Image: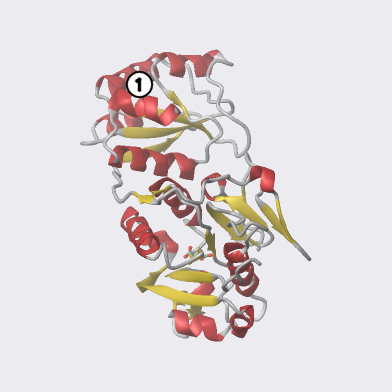
Amino acid sequence: MNAPRKQPAILIIYTGGTIGMYQNAQTGALCNFDFDRLVSYVPELQRFGYQLDSYTFPHPIDSSDMSPDNWVELVRIISDHYEQYDGFVVLHGTDTMAYTASALSFMLEGLSKPVVLTGSQLPVGALRTDGKENLLTAIEIAAARDKNGQAMVPEVCVFFESRLMRGNRTTKINAEGFDAFRSFNYHSLAHAGIHLRFERQYIRRVDANTPLTPHFRLDRNICVLTLFPGIQREIFDAILGVKNLKAVVLKTYGAGNAPQREWLREVLSHLRQRGVVVVNVTQCSKGTVEMARYESGLQLLQNGVVNGYDSTIECVVTKLMFLLGEGFEGEELRLKFEN
Ligand code: ASP
């Protein structure tokens, strides 16, 4: 006879964001309140029959204030509680949720338990809030097991409205609608309708016995530069002057193209000589960088620019911070990044 399955234990980590905000009567602006007040708006939590515990950031924040230090804090909380819980739900503001999800996906090496990030567009106390459903479904996903008792989604992911998406493939696309996130270049991992339908073929397969190796170092000596028609050399020169700069994310056009200017090639070659890695990401939401397709892209490839393929900007930024934090720089970073 199989041993009876114990009830799932889920740790809810509350970082802040609209889900837990209220309207300041004087200013009319939204500010954070604490987790206990948030829970008081969701009495349904009692009905799960799971062990639900919480951990609250000492000062819940608007996610515009999220920083690499907070990602380290999250990794510390998850790794310190890893053995005690079957899954983790991170309540987070929507603005930078995709950055946090991407960062965690790199920093939690060997993860074999669900880490589900969610939040909402309307505070949980608002009448038409999307926060309740997002929270309740995220908990259900974090607790979901297959028939062998293995976690259904053993990876860092974002749940919003009705979609579960891979964390480092997700982008916020809507500042207003409830349907606020997309994963343009990778399939959804699950859909929530009448049933929760998991797309097992797209979900990471892991060995549940792999130990978690948390990483705590990030290096923020990077910058993001978006091309636009008419961009001037002075902008690039200013970047060349940034002390300690180790990598640049270049947001190019279409399949990874840039204006064909001699000065741009010169700047790129200076950056390379200085050991600054330049990664090419397209400004398009969907599709991939193919630098050999046009001459306007080929010039970048020939000047040592690294291919960011179909990555989101959030993914590239956090991957660079992570790899730099691990001590990879210059040529080593280039190789590591493309692997
Ligand atoms: N400004 C808020 C935040 O990101 C927006 C939200 O949560 O939806 O914290």
Where residue 320 appears, as percent x and y from the top left, is: 37, 38
Q: Which residue is mark 1?
A: 268
Q: Residues within 10 Å of mark 1 (few under 14, many from 20)?
A: many
Q: As drawn, is 117 to the left or to the right of 191?
A: left
Q: Amino acid at mark 1?
A: Leu
- Looking at the figure, which quarter contains the N terminus? bottom right
- Work out whether residue 319 or residue 88 is closer to the camera in this orientation and state it: 88
Where residue 201 appears, as percent x and y from the top left, is: 68, 43
Name which residue lies at 38% across and 61% down: 74
Where residue 179 appears, as percent x and y from the top left, is: 66, 59
Q: Is residue 231 above or below residue 175?
A: above
Name which residue lies at 34% across and 29% down: 333
* Residue 308 visible in this rendered orientation of the protein: yes
Name which residue lies at 66% across and 48% down: 188
- Work out whether residue 312 or residue 81 is closer to the camera in this orientation and state it: 81
Where residue 338 appears, as percent x and y from the top left, is: 44, 27
* Residue 24 visible in this rendered orientation of the protein: no
| Circle 1: element type | helix
Q: As drawn, is 150 to the left or to the right of 275?
A: right
Instruction: Please state the total of marks drawn on the protein image.
Output: 1
- Work out whether residue 135 or residue 16 is closer to the camera in this orientation and state it: 135
**Looking at the image, what colour scheme do you see?**
secondary structure
Outermost residue, left direction? 243
Q: On the image, which quarter does residue 192 sit in? A: bottom right
- Looking at the figure, which quarter contains the C terminus? top left
